Image: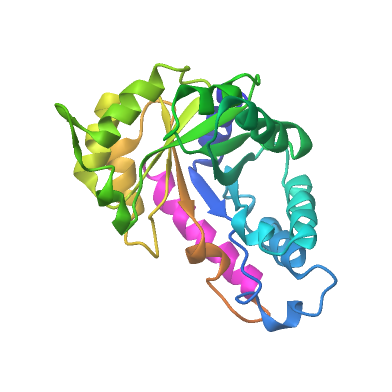
């Protein structure tokens, strides 16, 4: 998906909501467990219930890979079911030497035609560049994450700057804001402000809202740019908002509530 299309959808829906389809078979409602494909049945209902408020869906591939071949088929069906005007993210966090990265890019941009894939930059430019060779496709590079362990490396001093700052500045030089996004955690407004100052044009995928303690106003007030420029991911707070037969309706209401908060800033 081209950046201009994503921006158009953001302002049409007045939303920067990304719903994470982190579908855990142990957490989906009991009445779906006997379905031929419980994960897809759950995802289909969630998509139907939330698509009017959502500009992106993020499929965390770990929840599907853990199920073997059946999980990959569920993921494939889920991806095909997502409306074409909604941005799709393979949250796969791949990152390897060039010839292996080529195959990962082929996996998530050709075999499974996602719009984007999350990428770990630790191995350097040749591990990211293959993902930047596809027109209309995006590499979403890990920048500053919201987990507790981020302090182990990302917040360590690296010369005159912190390591995450060096990563952001360096990776931004490998491509353009038309094809590079960054994962930026939502839990600290000072960091959001700082990263937006560093990268005024880039899109950020922002996890950490909801279960991890981040909130929509903090993210919007400190990270929005003229194009929207952010995708706020919410997983558990939408897809597991309800546990019974009315789970889809509950997810609909949760997505609408997030969208309404976002609309005030767009």
Residue placed at 68% from the left, 37% from the top?
108
Q: Is residue 1 visible?
A: no
Where is residue 40? Give x, y as percent: 76, 62
Q: How is the image coloured?
A: rainbow
> Based on the displayed image, in which of its 4 quarters is residue 84 positioned?
top right
Query: In front: 260, or 80?
Result: 80
Query: In front: 31, or 150?
Result: 150
Where is residue 103? Give x, y as percent: 69, 32
The magenta span reads: 247-266
Can you say which quadrant of the picture contains the N terminus? Answer: top right
Q: Is residue 250 magenta?
A: yes
Number of disc labels = 0
Q: Is residue 61 visible?
A: yes
Where is residue 165? Give x, y as percent: 26, 31
Instruction: In the rendered view, tell whether residue 249 sits above or below residue 15.
Output: below
Residue placed at 45% from the left, 32% from the top?
123
Query: In front: 185, or 237?
Result: 185
Instruction: In the rendered view, tell whether residue 232 sits above or below residue 244.
Output: above
Can you say which quadrant of the picture contains the C terminus? Answer: top left
Instruction: In the rendered view, tell whether residue 177 sits above or below residue 117.
Output: above
| Left or right: 10 in relation to 102 | left
Where is residue 226? Give x, y as percent: 39, 25
> Based on the displayed image, in which of its 4 quarters is residue 144 positioned?
top left
Residue placed at 57% from the left, 42% from the top?
55
Q: Is residue 168 magenta?
A: no
Furthest residue toward left = 160
Instruction: In the rendered view, tell whether residue 252 sits above or below residue 219.
Output: below
> Based on the displayed image, in which of its 4 quarters is residue 23 positioned?
bottom right
| Left or right: 236 in relation to 76 | left
Please tell me whether the stretch drawn in magenta is mainly helix, strand or loop.
helix
């Amino acid at each position: 998906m081209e950046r201009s299309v994503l921006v158009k959808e953001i302002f049409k829906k007045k939303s920067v909501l990304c719903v994470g389809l982190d579908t855990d078979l142990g957490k989906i409602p009991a009445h779906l467990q006997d379905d031929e494909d419980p994960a897809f049945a759950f995802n289909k209902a969630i998509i139907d219930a939330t698509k009017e408020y959502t500009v992106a869906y993020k499929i965390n591939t770990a929840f599907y890979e853990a199920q073997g071949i059946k999980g990959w088929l569920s993921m494939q069906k889920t991806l095909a079911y997502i409306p074409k005007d909604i941005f799709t993210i393979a949250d796969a966090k791949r990152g390897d030497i060039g010839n292996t990265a080529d195959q990962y890019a082929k996996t998530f941009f050709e075999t499974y035609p996602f719009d984007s894939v999350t990428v770990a930059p630790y191995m350097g430019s040749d591990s990211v560049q293959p993902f930047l060779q596809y027109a209309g496709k995006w590499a979403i590079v890990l920048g500053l994450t919201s987990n507790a362990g981020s302090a182990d490396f990302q917040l360590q001093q690296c010369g005159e700057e912190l390591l995450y700052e060096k990563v952001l500045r360096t990776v931004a030089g490998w491509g353009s804001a038309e094809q590079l996004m960054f994962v930026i955690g939502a839990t600290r407004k000072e960091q959001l402000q700082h990263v937006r100052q560093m990268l005024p044009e880039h899109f950020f995928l922002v996890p950490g809202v909801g279960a991890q303690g981040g909130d929509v106003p903090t993210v919007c007030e400190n990270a929005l740019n003229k194009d929207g420029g952010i995708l706020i991911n919410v997983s558990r707070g939408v897809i597991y908002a309800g546990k019974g037969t009315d789970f889809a309706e509950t997810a609909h209401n949760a997505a609408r509530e997030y969208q309404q908060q976002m609309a005030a800033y767009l």
